[in-house]
Image: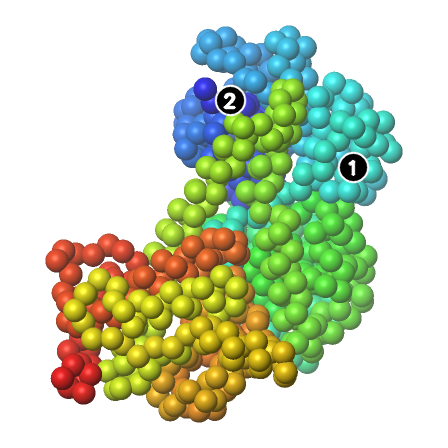
Amino acid sequence: MKKKIAFISDHASPLASLGGTDSGGQNVYVAETAKKIASLGYEIDIFTRKENPKSALEEDFAPGVKVIHISAGPTCKVPKESLLEYMDEFTENVIRYLESKDVYYQIIHAHFWMSGLVAMQIKKRLKIPFVITFHALGYIRKLHQKEADKFPEVRIDIEKEIVAHADYIIAECPQDRSDLIKHYSAEDPRIEIIPCGFNTEHFRPIAKNIAKEKIGLSSAHQVILQLGRMVPRKGVDNVVKAFAKIAADDPLMRLVIVGGDPDDNAAVSEISSLSALADELGISDQVIFSGNQQREVLKYYYSAADIFVSTPWYEPFGITPLESMACGTPVIGSNVGGIKYTVKNAETGFLIEPKDPDSLAEKLNFLLRNEKIRHQMSRNGLYRVHKYFTWESVSLSLSNLYNSVLKKQPFSNGHLATAISSSYREAISTFQRSSKELIPQILSIVEIMTKALSQGNKILVCGNGGSAAESQHFVAELIGRFEIPERKALPAISLNADTSVITAWANDFNYDEVFSRQIEALGNEGDVLFCLSTSGQSENIVKAIEKAQSLQMVCVNLLGKDGGKAARATPHNIIIPSYDTARIQELHLNTIHVLCKAIETILFNEKPEEEPSDLGIIQMNNLKYRKSWQSEKLFS
């Protein structure tokens, strides 16, 4: 039986459009963790305040996830600063829903302090344990916002009471944990640090020229990006002032500002103020206000940017720096809250003090003038976010926490089973993404390889570790047969097969040249070098490509992650859309089989019996060049 978890998110619905005053990171957090936790075998109901009279009581959001709209106060948008008076009504209507539906939740996960108040009251009456992610603390907000903070004074006292009654408190970063202990007397054993995350399907690197074209800019533009809610504490004015210091003499430089709901008066006012500031500084022609954008297009903005900037006065966590790094763009961020946890200073970007346009301008100027450093920061950022900050890892940590609250072992057989199931789902997801994205690259590689073979040339294949095994596997299929038993052998050599050559050269000279040395001996003009690598960073692979190109060979790669150095050495690449080595290796094997099928289909004129659906075979019977590449020399 699936465990049922209740999320309470009083003002931040996963169904809301992002970019408004009260719609931002919390909405994303609630949406993404709910979906991922449900995929681990839970049922999630998200209770949020009803803002639209047309909203149904219940609305399906994702498999295993349902949004429940609770009446509390007027059925319209109300600033979250004014919602406290409606929380008693919210609590009563949640309990009424539970009683009418005869539903029981094993645990409640409250998001934000008013949701924590609701969860605390439900715990007192129905004995349901709760955990809370505050997303922001009233004491810290008041410290930075001062009189601009419009929340009621009683907020801090309520937060202290919630801290005392919560079964666990989720801190999103070490600073959050420290603040809870120092200002709220939270007990350290009841605090668990679980960060925010990013969506690996939505956010990944896109070639800059393509990304810039998508957002209406040319490849000649240098782009600084600011993306987020349009509220004063985000410090967007700081970015505009810094940009003015470096952009006045460069007409091709652009500051792109994304965010701001046109129906939100506060956001409209903030954008108007920022626009006036840009005009006053003489850079209005170089500042682009792009407004709200759908989540699926944000990767183009992040990827188009040379640098992403986020310099809020304070930030409990901040998801946008993660999304930027996931798209390969370095971040300059404020040395505050969660940003100083996610951004590694001088490794994935820079940390600076907020409200300091001179310091920001200095770092912007430095990075814009140092492409090599930007590229290294890009790689470091990609590695960091995929290692620590995916929603998959965040949700698994939350699941462990729930189990701890329910007094179960974190790594029981049941939990291990869900982790195993999650691996299969990740594999399925990677296969699905590959089937949508890789067909053009595969068709291009098939064209190169079949043309070379039909002209009497050969294929040389190499790789390291698991890729070495795949190298020999691929060659065995080409020389032997894949599906056509009586066809002629195809000339192919695995550079991993001769262990005497490899160990002798590696021992006496340099392992980095074990493949390039063989290519020098065996390669000829027109041959194809096929390199396998999960990362594309191996020096012996890069040197092999360089040697092959010097002999006028054609180099093609089967890679993963961002393709690494190998992808930049040749335009002919198949890059598996994943950063998980296991998933990449699984798709490498599948892609090798797809290539073998395609090569045999074209060279030996075996037409599929039915319309194919496997990756790389789609539309294969429509390839116009099938017969034209068949050579009498090869088939006589």
The residue wearing badge 2 is 3
Instruction: Quadrant for the C terminus, please.
Output: bottom left
368 to 126, vertically: above or below: below
Is residue 555 or residue 84 the one in the foreground? 555
> Percent from the top left, x then y, of residue 33?
55, 37
Query: What is the three-letter code of the residue carrying label 1?
Result: Arg
> Percent from the top left, x then y, of residue 272?
62, 55
> Percent from the top left, x then y, of residue 255?
62, 66
| Crowding at mark 1 (Cα within 10 Å: few <14, some 14-19, many 20+) | some
Q: Residue at x 81, y 30 (%)?
A: 188
Would you identify the image quadrant in which residue 624 lies? bottom left
Q: Is residue 605 visible?
A: yes
Would you identify the image quadrant in which residue 94 lies? top right
Is residue 336 or residue 484 the one in the foreground? 484
Mark 1–mark 2 distance (CA, rounded to whole Å): 28 Å
What SS does tag 2 mark?
loop
The residue wearing badge 1 is 177
